[in-house]
Image: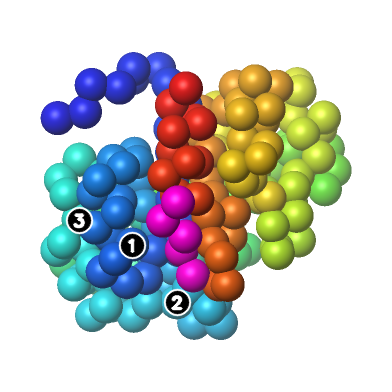
Amino acid sequence: MRTYDSKATKIKLCGLSCREDILLANELRPDYIGFVFFEKSKRYVNHDEAQRLKEGLEPGIGAVGVFVNEDMERILALFNGGVIDLAQLHGDESPEYILRLKERSGKELIQAFRIKDEADLKRAAESPADYVLLDSGYGGGVPLDWGMLKGFKRPYFLAGGLNISNVREAIGALSPYGVDVSSGIESGGKKDAEKMRRFVEIVRQ
């Protein structure tokens, strides 16, 4: 059982796609790991692959399914099969879609927002999802402009360009509810065990 401070910054290691990633996650004990179900992503896993990976994941680590404009029935099938514990929505999902998915699944949802101006922050603040994730939306590890988030009141996951070089500064500046990392713990497009270990260590310090 984990003994980490419940008020500490949550950690989500996203884009895990092989057994070695899961074994290391079991060792590091992040709060969440992410499976990407968006077929255009290089980190894509299908239902059967994710199920095998989830079966090897230690209890207490939340498995998050990452989706882009996904058919609701597919998400529900993953929930009902125990493959994922939460869903993270990165598309153009409407408030009505989110409320319906919450009602039908009984599970927690994360809605991701590409933050480029105040209007994006307003939409994030008003999301009916349980959590919001704030990202630069540019991909490729490009950081979000942290200065834009100074007045944002709702707890959020910070994403976009986080790595072992800047996550300490990000937490010190913003005190986010959680941090989400994918490319920042990779080398050559694959998860890097040393970067994963170091990222978790820095956040927990």
Q: Is residue 93 left or right of residue 205?
A: right
State the SS at label 1.
Answer: helix
Which of labels 3 and 2 is toward the front?
Answer: 3
Query: x%, y% of residue 114?
Result: 71, 52
Q: Is residue 189 left or right of residue 26?
A: right
- Check residue 147 for magenta coloring: no
Query: x%, y% of residue 30?
Result: 34, 41
* Magenta segment: 190-194
Disc number placed over residue 57 in the picture, else none: 3
Q: Is residue 20 left or right of residue 114?
A: left
Instruction: Give the amino acid at mark 1.
Output: Asp
Determine which residue is flagged by label 2. 44
Query: x%, y% of residue 13?
Result: 43, 50
Nearest the eye: 162 or 100:
162
Separation of disc 1 and disc 3 at Cα? 10 Å
Q: Is residue 119 left or right of residue 34?
A: right
